[in-house]
Image (tube, rainbow, N blue to C red):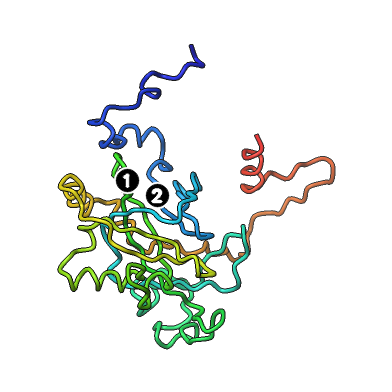
Amino acid sequence: MASKELAIFKKGMPDYLKTQGLDEATKNLMGKASGGMKRISIKGSAFRMIVNGEETAVSEDRSQEWIIISVAPDLQRVFFDGSYQEGKPMSPRCWSSNSKVPDENVPDPVSKTCNDCPNNIKGSGQGEGRACRFSRRIAVMLTNDPTNTIYQVVLPGTSLFGKGEHYKWPLDQYAKYLGTNGVSISHVVTKASFDIKSPTPKLTFAPVREVSKAEYDVIVKQYESEDTKKAIQLNIAPPPVKAEAKDSDEPVVKATKGTVETPDSAADIAKKWAND
């Protein structure tokens, strides 16, 4: 009996329940991890599904159809001190939600303003690029997704700026094309495609069709949702501050070799859990 799956997992939930999502009771029992941000990453020029910080799926398709629900009102910037190494996590040194001044939670800003920052100079990064890079966070839904899940996509500057080609526009030029024709970006299904000529991950955009009435009703609802608001925010936690050594009146007990074991650190305990 224990090895058999529940019937509801085999046949799937009915349509009227698929769109409801998890209730608060289930989320509370699952813990905070269930409420993590869902993202679509374009790392390695592939669409990667990221759930709770873990990569859950990779698509071999060169394009996806999105409904762009909302975008960050301002360009954002992030600066990493040092070169990126595959598989090695890095914390940014400085960041800005409006590309004008560093955010208040940046512990040690490089400059008071982004315009005067040495990392804003062409050539300060790789080639002619700037070391402090532009990006914009957008909130999207995948078409034909009955769950209407909101995904965050972080678009680099290469996917934002430039003129592009007809029906292969960067996001800013795509929005201008729609706007000059009296069309809102959230009122069309957008095809996001990888530029196969680009050596780095780069997307281009083009309209596919207008959204249906059912899709529009979902868009109106999701535009005001907390998931959408979180998806377009630059939310970077500052690195932990190292505690300074302080004088203490407590006696220092030195362990005798072979008689007293040093207690495991938190990192040691975490490694053991991972190996169990």
Say which residue label 2 marks: 38
Q: Nearer the viewer, residue 250 or 49?
A: 49
Residue at figure coordinates x 82%, y 46% from the top left: 256
Q: Position of residue 227 (x, y in %)?
A: 30, 51
Q: Nearer the viewer, residue 242 or 113?
A: 113
Is 182 positioned to the left or the right of 162 in the image?
left
Above or below for 155 versus 24: below
Residue at figure coordinates x 48%, y 16% from the top left: 4
Q: Position of residue 221 (x, y in %)?
A: 19, 49
Is 86 positioned to the left or the right of 19 in the image?
right
**Which quadrant of the figure has residue 115?**
bottom left
Q: Residues within 10 Å of mark 2 (few under 14, many from 20)?
A: some
Seen as rendered, the residue at the extreme right is 258
Question: For numbered disc 1, what is the local secondary structure?
Answer: loop
Say which residue label 1 marks: 149
Residue at figure coordinates x 42%, y 54% from the top left: 40
Q: Amino acid at mark 2?
A: Lys
Q: Position of residue 72 (x, y in %)?
A: 30, 66
Which numbered circle lies on residue 69? none
Mark 2 and mark 1 in contact? Answer it, CB < 8 Å: yes
